[in-house]
Image (tube, helix red, strand yellow):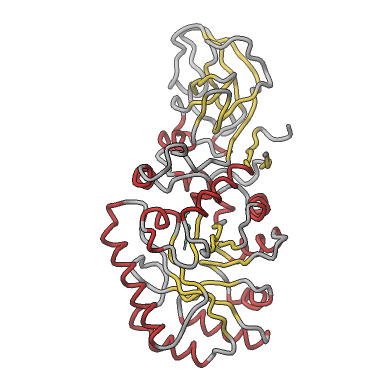
Amino acid sequence: MNHTSYIEISKSAYKKNIQFLRQEVDEQTTISAVVKGNAYGHGIEHIVPIAEAAGVRHFSTFSADEALRVFEASSKKSEIMIMGMLENSDLEELIRKGISFFVFEFDRLEKTIQAAKSTGIKAKIHIEVETGFHRTGFEWAEREKLLEILRENESHLYLAGLCTHYAGAESVSNYVRVREQIKKYHQFKDWFTEKGMSFERYHTACSAATFSYPETIMDMVRIGIASYGFWPTMETYMYKFKSLPENNKNPLKRLISWKSSIMSLKKVKMGDFIGYGSSYMAPRDMTIALVPIGYSHGYSRLLSNQGKVLIAGKIVSVVGTVTMNSIAVDITDLKNVKKGDEVVLIGKQKKNEITVASFGESTQQVNYELLTRLPMDIPRKVVK
Ligand SMILES: *Cc1c(COP(=O)(O)O)cnc(C)c1O
């Protein structure tokens, strides 16, 4: 092992998640796999082939660099869509590669038309409309001007989508706001239709909206967190729970396990302090195992004296502070543990499991943040 830890990614778990999601949407609905944030920390280059093997043919990224990585990793000519950042200087390359992107302001629209003219290829665009998220999107008041430009440039633009994004479909506290957004979106949609303008796909739903507001499903859903085996929030799961079949109350399977191994063992006398400072004094004679992962690897300092890991199938505790490169864990009560034994930081070992959620709770991070903070340089390994 050249690295101090590695991440396993389960191919079969991803497939099960997509199968479950397929049942949740209509037959003709496209599932776009959202792979922003380096595929939620899993690695774009790993997820794209896994997703394609599970039948996915549409990917969504935040930025142009991610889209180009998907393009390289795809062997099935899947569609690729950028939902956020790109530079004007990227436009011609994106158009040539057939990569579509959100357009939410006139400046980008004009630059897109110019690039389509100079390449002689239609640019595939998704018009994003402002419905209440207040981040990006054309305003209602801008619709006439927008329509006019779209009409004038019909020969340079392919209208791939009309879209918006919800401001928190994962919590009932945003219910009124999301309902308003759905209404606003339909005002835009109906207005364009009345004017005789149609789009290839109408799409608004993320994971939470797909589960909690099924009327938002339409032609395509943009699924991130659920495809990686996580409910957007506990609340979304609770909402969905009743309608799940008795024999499948836990349909989303996590892909990730994070593993390391024991670097060395040490005996500590009662009264000795472990690690930096005095946050942990041994309450008895102890054996500790040193594990070579620390906050530089994404194992938060907040897990000092809090974290749990699995060794020999048992849950054991982090003692003392998490340092840059290592943690100490209490293995006093385990028998036959030796240097080199597997340590599970996230995932299963025998009958026990450390979930990302339980890990996240003690560090106050949501699943999304925790996953995407797993450093890119920890090697990822695809397993069955
Ligand atoms: C991130 C994102 C999604 C996916 O959200 P999940 O909650 O992970 O399913 C969908 N649409 C847009 C615009 C996004 O930025």
Q: Residue at x 65, y 56 (%)?
A: 52
Of 371 and 144, nearer the camera is 144
Q: Residue at x 68, y 73 (%)?
A: 97
**Image location (x, y in percent) of residue 106:** 46, 82
Look at the picture and state if 22 lies above or below 160. above
Q: Hey, which quadrant is residue 280 in on the image?
A: top left
**Image location (x, y in percent) of residue 110:** 53, 85
Q: Hey, which quadrant is residue 1 in on the image?
A: top right
**Image location (x, y in percent) of residue 213:** 36, 58
Look at the picture and state if 178 lies above or below 246. below
| Residue 21 relative to residue 186: left or right | right
Look at the picture and state if 319 lies above or below 98. above
Of 250 and 236, nearer the camera is 250
Of 267 and 348, nearer the camera is 348
| Residue 160 relative to residue 235: left or right | right
Location of the C terminus (image quadrant): top right
**Image location (x, y in percent) of residue 301:** 48, 34
Q: Residue at x 62, y 29 (%)?
A: 292
Look at the picture and state if 244 lies above or below 67. above
How many marks the image carries: the answer is 0
Q: Hey, which quadrant is residue 136 in on the image?
A: bottom left
Of 107 and 53, nearer the camera is 53
Q: Residue at x 62, y 63 (%)?
A: 65
